[in-house]
Image: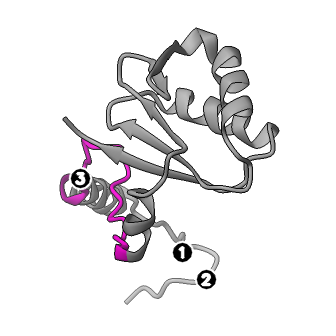
Amino acid sequence: MKFYKDKERALSVEITPLIDIVFLLVIFFVVTSKIETNQYLTLDLPESESFASSLSNNSQNIILLESGVFIVNNQEFAVADIDKLLAGVASSFSESEVVVLSIESKAFHEWVINLMDGLQALGFQNIQIKTYTD
């Protein structure tokens, strides 16, 4: 009977089963992963009853339509004329009272941010936003 000596014996590791297992794991994770087509964040915003009551009695209201038209005191201003709008707001609105922005739901967010920045630059600190749909 022949016995192996430590010097004669060569150790080897078969990697073929390891490669098979790795590919099976990759296929498993690809098949079971959830591919989301919707990349938007959905938010459930809370509703407030006390806030809604203060909106109805306000005369300092700026309306923004989805077409890009601002309406202030029955006067219409285009989005490009935001400087004229802010000049009219500064002369007719009081800084201590609440300014309500009534915005159609499909209006661009950029218009709202530009208006809010302009109002805050004029010193208006109490700005409320409400959105509505047709």
Residue 37 location in percent, x, y? 24, 41
Q: Quadrant of residue 86?
A: top right
Name the magenta segment's main secondary structure.
loop
Q: Give whichever of 47, 78 is nearer the camera.
A: 78
Report the quarter where the C terminus lies: top left
Q: Which residue is mark 1?
A: 9
Q: Which residue is mark 2?
A: 6
Residue type highlighted by circle 2: Asp
Does the CB distance between marks 1 and 2 fall below 8 Å?
yes
Residue 67 location in percent, x, y? 36, 16
Is residue 40 magenta-colored? yes
Report the quarter where the N terminus lies: bottom left
Q: Secondary structure at mark 3?
A: helix
Q: Give whichever of 19, 10 is nearer the camera.
A: 19
Q: Which residues are magenta?
A: 31-49
Q: CA distance from mark 3 to mark 1?
A: 37 Å
Residue type highlighted by circle 3: Ile
Q: Secondary structure at mark 1?
A: loop
Q: Which residue is mark 3?
A: 27
